[in-house]
Image (cartoon, rainbow, N blue to C red):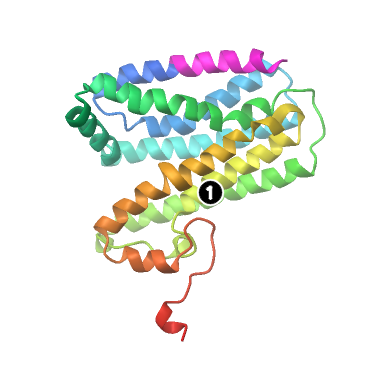
Amino acid sequence: MEIAQLLVPNLLLSITLFVFLWLINLRLKDPSFIDSWWALGMVVLAGLSFVSTGQGGKHALLLTGLCTVWGLRLGVYLLWRWRKHGPDRRYSSMMALAKSERGWGYATASLLLVFALQMPLQFIVSLPVQLGQIGPDAALGPLAFLGAAMAVLGIAFETVGDLQLVAFKADPANAGKVLQSGLWRYTRHPNYFGDACTWWGLYLIAADHGLGAWSIPGPVLLTFLLTRWSGVPTVEGRMRRKRPEYEAYLSRTSGFIPWFPRKPSSETH
């Protein structure tokens, strides 16, 4: 199978589904649910690639299986979070700003700033689980085993981090406080680190087989989004404004890759 034979139908389906979700969003007047589709849509693309290639090889099974576990877990969690807590403040602010500064109506703002933006980003990030399935069946090599271990570690890390955060927020005594225990003691963003670890692992599985090595823009883009654009900068900007103790937490805790906390400067002398 040629690349275009796989990617073009996948892209057309992705566009169709995003348009459909945008129409639903017009009725709800809330685009927050798109976060869950970020993960669930990748499961759809992985599954469609599995069916389209028709190989059912070891790499395809591993990529599709791991992507499905990751995507269903994260997608359902984000859907639950949206239903429990309501509209995401980021999107509410984005829509209000688009109206006040650009004069855009809700339909235009949600289409251009949310749905039309996330569709190509999702498609590029998911390239490993698409391109990695092209080619005849082959034995899993060292890169695939390393990638599988990384992906499993990433899924587990992200899951535990999310569970710890949910439990922390559920305790009224923690209102206004910063979570600084569990995995959050070693990195300020265990969920984002787990995400990146998962997708670099999936890339290694893909790179072990056929055209998968060419899918490297996927994990590179995801890492950029998490660390430089919509992930870490957004969360830390909000936490700095609303949590006075966050500055101290920031100064001693690794920003992304887990590591032991730094001692306060007063303890180093």
Task: Give the answer, above or below, for where 69 lies relative to 135.
Answer: below
Please say whether residue 69 is one of the residues in the magenta stretch.
no
At label 1, which amino acid type do we have? Gly
Task: Give the answer, above or below, for where 93 lies relative to 43.
Answer: below
What percent of the width, then of the height, locates residue 164? 42, 56
Instruction: Report the residue marked by disc 1.
Output: 194
Q: Chief secondary structure of the magenta span?
A: helix
For residue 110, side relative to residue 161 (left or right)? left
User: Measuring 68% from the left and 43% from the top, which residue is drawn there?
Assistant: 148
User: Measuring 37% from the left and 35% from the top, which residue is drawn there?
Assistant: 79
User: Measuring 60% from the left and 34% from the top, which residue is drawn there?
Assistant: 217
Labels in figure, total: 1
For residue 43, side relative to residue 92 (left or right)? right
Q: Secondary structure at mark 1?
A: helix
Instruction: Using the image as rendered, state which of residue 145 and residue 231 is in the foreground.
Output: 231
For residue 63, side relative to residue 262 (left or right)? right
Instruction: Using the image as rendered, state which of residue 230 and residue 201 is in the foreground.
Output: 230
The range drawn in magenta is 1-16
Instruction: Using the image as rendered, state which of residue 8 and residue 164 is in the foreground.
Output: 8
> If the image is split into quadrants, where does the N terminus sit?
top right
What percent of the width, then of the height, locates residue 16? 45, 14
For residue 140, side relative to residue 217 (left or right)? right
Query: For mark 1, does the 10 Å Cα neighbourhood hold few (<14), some (14 to 19), or many (20 or more) residues?
Result: many
Q: Quarter of the image holding residue 141?
A: top right
What percent of the width, then of the height, locates residue 34? 38, 30
Instruction: Using the image as rendered, state which of residue 207 and residue 162 is in the foreground.
Output: 207
User: Measuring 51% from the left and 13% from the top, which residue is drawn there?
Assistant: 12
